[in-house]
């Protein structure tokens, strides 16, 4: 588990890098804040200067046998091999992963260059979408959202397996740190037809893992559910964020009807 001091240092470095490079890093703060962080094997890699100031950080995010990584280096400390050092340490610890993805903002030329220099091949890109204004109200009879309970776990895992092509092991790994906390069930006339996960931070709320049963898509259920939860978060002075694959036109269209607009993108590179 990361200490409060470590989280503060990471957040401070993130602000410096994002301001300098005019980008937004995807650091998955819900996973960084997990109590089970780095319990079984290293997931966070640090580089400090002689005065104890954090100059470089790289995080590993595990999804079953697959992993993603995202890193950053203080602009004043670049070209010193810090990023390569941290990446080499992570690769050594996670060399048995079935898939190793490097995440970098599309607008980060240094990030793309680093991936290519390490022989990683471009895999895919995700839009980052944001909503900071109340969406146009939209309701559908019989549709509601409720917090998930322990008895929903089997259904939640099934939604992830069917909707995202995950194995049971990969799906379970998404909830290993906090169970169903933050997960919401989408119901139609009292029957679960989908779910999503919400990570609330001080000024932001991130939506993850939104999925509906195939038979229930295109019927206005997703729009009603998303509009409901986004309205709640924005009403509480939150800016709401989510990611969507650039080739998923149906999802992109749905999110736009719920008040989201594109604000940056994240590229993923596959490292062998």
Image (spheres, rainbow, N blue to C red):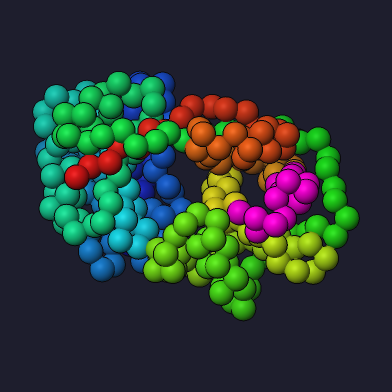
**Image point (17%, 49%), residue name:** 91
**Image point (22%, 49%), residue name:** 45
Q: Where residue 178 sits: x, y (%)?
A: 48, 67
Range covered by the magenta-colored residues: 211-229
Q: Where residue 199 sits: x, y (%)?
A: 55, 52
* Residue 25 to residue 32: above or below: above
Instruction: Tell me, yes or no, if residue 248 can be seen here.
Output: yes
Reply yes or no: does residue 216 show up in magenta.
yes
Reply yes or no: does residue 220 show up in magenta.
yes
Q: Is residue 202 left or right of residue 82?
A: right
Q: Which quadrant of the structure image shows residue 65?
A: bottom left
Q: Where residue 193 sits: x, y (%)?
A: 70, 62
View extreme (bottom): residue: 151
Give the main secondary structure, helix, strand or loop, of the magenta stretch: helix
View extreme (front): residue: 215
* Residue 223 to residue 33: above or below: above
Q: Nearer the viewer, residue 99 or 41?
A: 99
Q: Nearer the viewer, residue 177 or 250?
A: 250
Q: Is residue 105 left or right of residue 258?
A: left
Q: Is residue 73 left or right of residue 136?
A: left
**Image point (50%, 62%), residue name:** 161
């Amino acid at each position: 588990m990361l200490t409060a001091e470590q989280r503060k240092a990471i957040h401070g470095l993130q602000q410096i890098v994002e301001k300098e490079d005019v980008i937004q890093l995807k650091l998955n703060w819900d996973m960084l804040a997990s109590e089970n962080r780095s319990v079984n094997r290293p997931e966070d890699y640090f580089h400090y200067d002689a005065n104890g100031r954090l100059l470089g950080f790289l995080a590993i995010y595990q999804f079953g046998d697959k992993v993603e990584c995202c890193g950053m280096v203080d602009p004043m400390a670049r070209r010193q091999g810090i990023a390569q050092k941290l990446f080499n340490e992570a690769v050594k610890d996670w060399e048995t992963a079935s898939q190793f993805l490097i995440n970098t903002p599309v607008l980060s030329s240094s990030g793309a260059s680093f991936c290519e220099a390490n022989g990683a091949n471009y895999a895919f890109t995700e839009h980052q979408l944001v909503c900071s204004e109340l969406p146009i109200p939209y309701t559908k009879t019989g549709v509601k959202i409720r917090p998930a309970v322990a008895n929903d776990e089997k259904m939640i895992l099934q939604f992830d397996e069917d909707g995202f092509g995950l194995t049971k092991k990969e799906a379970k790994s998404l909830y290993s740190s906090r169970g169903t906390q933050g997960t919401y069930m989408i119901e139609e006339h009292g029957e679960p037809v989908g779910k999503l996960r919400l990570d609330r931070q001080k000024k932001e709320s991130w939506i993850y893992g939104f999925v509906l049963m195939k038979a229930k898509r295109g019927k206005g259920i997703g729009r009603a559910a998303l509009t409901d939860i986004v309205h709640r978060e924005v009403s509480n002075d939150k800016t709401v964020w989510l990611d969507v694959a650039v080739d998923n036109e149906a999802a992109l269209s749905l999110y736009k009807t719920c008040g989201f607009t594109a604000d940056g993108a994240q590229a993923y590179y596959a490292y062998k």
